[in-house]
Image: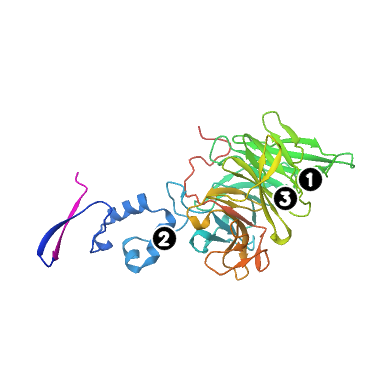
């Protein structure tokens, strides 16, 4: 089939035939209303992800007449990998209104009513799935984009008190493992123990392991998210010390602390996997200092990282992950779950400028002053409109 399109034009020499090759733009635009409903549906399904579809509809009344509006929670066949992660939070977990802030589009703020989440608290996020707790022992997965829910066996504790919790892969996969850690007083009342809880997809009960932790100065579990890396779970404490849990033999080991004078027991550190490496983001008082390190496993040293390249980091107490930036202005930055005081603009730290900024507004600072955040019910989320095939935790997909 010929990929060329003919058009007729007039010039000073009279009528002549011109040829348009693929990639050229025709002079006279074709109105959308000449397309029938089937053609419009085909374009929307194959070439627009859900957010671009909405942006297109909002551009003009003519567009809305041709392409009906849809909700952000409408189903979509694929994950939108070209979107940046969004900041999701609820200022009051007793209400059902959640904010979804999109830093890629100058901090557009979408509101979703999620009645299933009233009274629930976000504990972790991966791949668009929220791990939520409710009440004392109830825990479940929830995808706010598809409104799908996966119920889990109740926690084997009197109440949720973990310092960190994570899951290894999408809860829709057969190899998903949920991992949690906390420190508790030992039975002698004189020392402490590390308690590990985990459950695999298809299991009806949680497994529990406990290990002596006589020296809390050597390792004290930190309130942040563990990282699943190369088949084991890594946890970090305030001093940059790593604890490693191996599921194969249910072993726990505290690694020798990689020496570095910048670490302090007063301020948090965040583990994140990036480009196949383990990174550590260390913050100073009110974010006045931001340091990024890469773990050298051979030397067991933290090497300073000065540039993330095309990557961006999303840091928080309930999710820490990396992504390749969808555009140049978003790369080489660390995004925090904080907003400017006017309620607009996600705060990020630029490794290039050494300051905090926000897209769409004039904000530049060297600390977290004039910002708000670290909400108790917030996380970074990767937009995911993919429908799950199996929502029964006890019956994993084949």
**Which residues, given as a range, are shown in magenta?**
1-10
Predominant SS of the magenta segment:
strand
Disc 2 vs disc 1: Cβ atoms closer than 8 Å? Answer: no
Indicate the position of residue 171 as horizontal and vertical percent values: 56, 41
Residue at position x 73%, y 39% from top?
Answer: 243
Specify the label residue 205 is tagged with. none
Residue 269 falls left or right of residue 43: right
Mark 3 surroundings: few (<14), some (14-19) or many (≥20) residues within 10 A: many
First in sequence, mark 2 or 3: give its number. 2
Q: Is mark 1 on a helix, strand or loop?
A: loop
Quadrant housing the N terminus: top left
Q: Which mark lies nearer to you, 2 or 1? A: 1
The residue singled out by tag 1 in the image is 220
Specify the label residue 223 is tagged with. 3
Mark 2 surroundings: few (<14), some (14-19) or many (≥20) residues within 10 A: some
Disc 2 vs disc 3: Cβ atoms closer than 8 Å? Answer: no
Q: Can residue 129 be seen in this view?
A: no
Indicate the position of residue 398 as horizontal and vertical percent values: 50, 32
Q: Is mark 3 on a helix, strand or loop?
A: loop
Q: In which quarter of the image is residue 341?
A: bottom right
Q: According to the image, what is the colour scheme of the structure?
A: rainbow
Residue at position x 38%, y 63% from top?
Answer: 57
Residue 389 falls left or right of residue 364: left
Give the Cα distance between marks 2 and 3. 38 Å
Q: Which mark lies nearer to you, 2 or 3? A: 3
Disc 1 vs disc 3: Cβ atoms closer than 8 Å? Answer: no
Q: Is residue 192 visible?
A: yes
Q: Is mark 2 on a helix, strand or loop?
A: helix
């Amino acid at each position: 089939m010929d990929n060329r399109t003919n058009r007729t034009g007039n010039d000073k020499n009279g009528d002549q035939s011109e040829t348009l090759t693929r990639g050229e733009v025709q002079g006279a635009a074709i109105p959308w209303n000449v397309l029938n409903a089937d053609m419009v549906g085909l374009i929307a399904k194959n070439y627009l992800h859900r957010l671009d579809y909405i942006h297109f509809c909002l551009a003009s009344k003519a567009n809305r007449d041709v392409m009906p509006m849809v909700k952000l929670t409408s189903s979509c066949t694929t994950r939108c990998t070209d979107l940046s992660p969004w900041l999701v939070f609820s200022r009051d977990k007793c209400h059902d209104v959640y904010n979804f802030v999109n830093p890629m589009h100058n901090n557009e703020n979408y509101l979703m009513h999620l009645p299933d989440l009233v009274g629930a608290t976000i504990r972790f996020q991966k791949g668009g799935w929220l791990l939520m707790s409710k009440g004392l022992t109830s825990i479940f997965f929830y995808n706010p984009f598809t409104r799908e829910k996966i119920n889990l066996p109740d926690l084997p504790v009197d109440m949720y008190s973990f310092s960190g919790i994570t899951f290894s892969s999408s809860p829709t996969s057969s190899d998903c493992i949920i991992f949690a850690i906390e420190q508790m007083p030992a039975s002698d009342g004189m020392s402490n123990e590390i308690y590990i809880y985990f459950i695999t997809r298809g299991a009806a009960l949680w497994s529990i392991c406990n290990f002596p932790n006589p020296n809390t100065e050597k390792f004290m579990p930190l309130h942040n998210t563990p990282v699943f890396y190369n088949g084991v779970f890594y946890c970090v404490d305030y001093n940059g010390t790593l604890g490693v849990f191996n599921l194969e033999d249910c072993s726990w080991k505290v690694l020798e602390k990689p020496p570095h004078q910048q670490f302090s027991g007063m301020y948090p550190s965040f583990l994140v996997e990036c480009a196949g490496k383990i990174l550590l983001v260390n913050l100073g008082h009110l974010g006045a200092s931001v340091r990024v390190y890469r773990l050298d496993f051979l030397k067991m040293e933290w090497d300073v990282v000065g540039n993330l390249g095309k990557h961006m980091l999303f840091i928080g107490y309930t999710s820490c992950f990396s992504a390749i930036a969808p555009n140049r202005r978003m790369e080489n930055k660390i995004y925090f779950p904080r907003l400017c005081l006017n309620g607009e603009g996600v705060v990020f730290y630029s490794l290039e400028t050494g300051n905090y900024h926000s897209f769409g507004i004039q904000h530049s600072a060297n600390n977290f002053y004039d910002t708000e955040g670290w909400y108790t019910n917030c996380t970074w989320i990767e937009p995911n409109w993919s429908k799950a095939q199996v929502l029964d935790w006890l019956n994993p997909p084949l």
